[in-house]
Amino acid sequence: MKLLLVGYGRMGRLVEELAKAEGLDVVGCIDIHNAESDWPQADVAINFSVAEAVPEMVKRLVSQGTNIVIGTTGWRVQESELRRLVKESNLGVVAAENCSIGINIFQLLVAEAGRLMAGHDQYGAFLHERHHSEKRDAPSGTALTLRDVLVQAGYQHSIDMSSVRAGQIPGTHTIGFDGSSDTIELTHTARDRRGFASGALLAARWINGRHGWYSMTDVLQGERARVRQS
């Protein structure tokens, strides 16, 4: 599989390192210094660029017939247009606010918690997330996704959300339900960026040769089905 990296900051360099260790062919790395030049042909592109670059990035990759993994947040306002382009081009996209395998399994746990707590009005829900001081968006894209996961699971009560940005705090998301007699908390903490890079590579392998618009949940469920069949 030929892999193109779009966005060559810390995440892009880590994806490149892991990809080469896994024997994948990284045919190019795109950043602000070479974005206007010709992009190499690839089977899948992994994008960890800035949000404002995502729409043009997708359009360019669609024109080259390249499937895409999007690991950037903050671009969803143009999602409907990008979905249309991808559908018309018969390509494949995995779009994830967070590519970490762990956080996506965490989302499945949160969904189950939402279903179980939906009928228990005596508990109030809260979502607290903490990140390092350089994290731009607050609340994070992952926090907003977790909130939506709860709602889609049937939890219709209010969900109090809070964010902290300070120092070098690792990305931490806590979903809690507090009642008069007890508190239930589910927490995911990302200790480093390797989990995000590994998830992006898993998504790249999975979307190679596929068509349609998918999430990391689709990737994980597809992998689980493959393992069961093997």
Image (cartoon, rainbow, N blue to C red):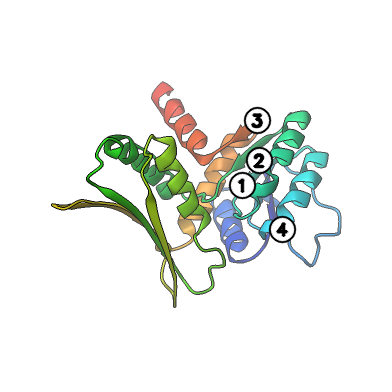
Labels 2 and 1: the sequence-earlier one:
2
Mark 4 or 2, closer to the camera: 4
Labels 4 and 2: the sequence-earlier one:
2
Q: Amino acid at mark 1?
A: Leu
Q: Position of residue 17 (x, y in %)?
A: 57, 59
Q: Amino acid at mark 4?
A: Glu
Mark 1 sits on what residue? 24
How many labels were placed on the picture? 4
Mark 3 or 1, closer to the camera: 3
In the image shown, does 228 or 17 lie closer to the viewer? 228
Q: CA distance from mark 3 to mark 1?
A: 23 Å
- Residue at point 53% right, 68% down? 135
Q: Quadrant of the N terminus?
A: top right
Q: Mark 3 touching mark 2, by CB under 8 A?
A: no
Q: Is residue 21 left or right of residue 172?
A: right
Above or below: residue 123 compared with residue 89: below
In the image shown, does 35 or 168 lie closer to the viewer? 168
- Residue at point 79% right, 44% down? 59
Label ID, residue 212:
3
Mark 4 sits on what residue? 52
- Residue at point 36% right, 43% down? 157
Labels 4 and 1: the sequence-earlier one:
1
Mark 2 sits on what residue? 1
Q: Mark 2 touching mark 1, by CB under 8 A?
A: yes
Q: CA distance from mark 4 to mark 2?
A: 28 Å
Above or below: residue 81 compared with residue 26: above
Q: Residues within 10 Å of mark 1 (few under 14, many from 20)?
A: some
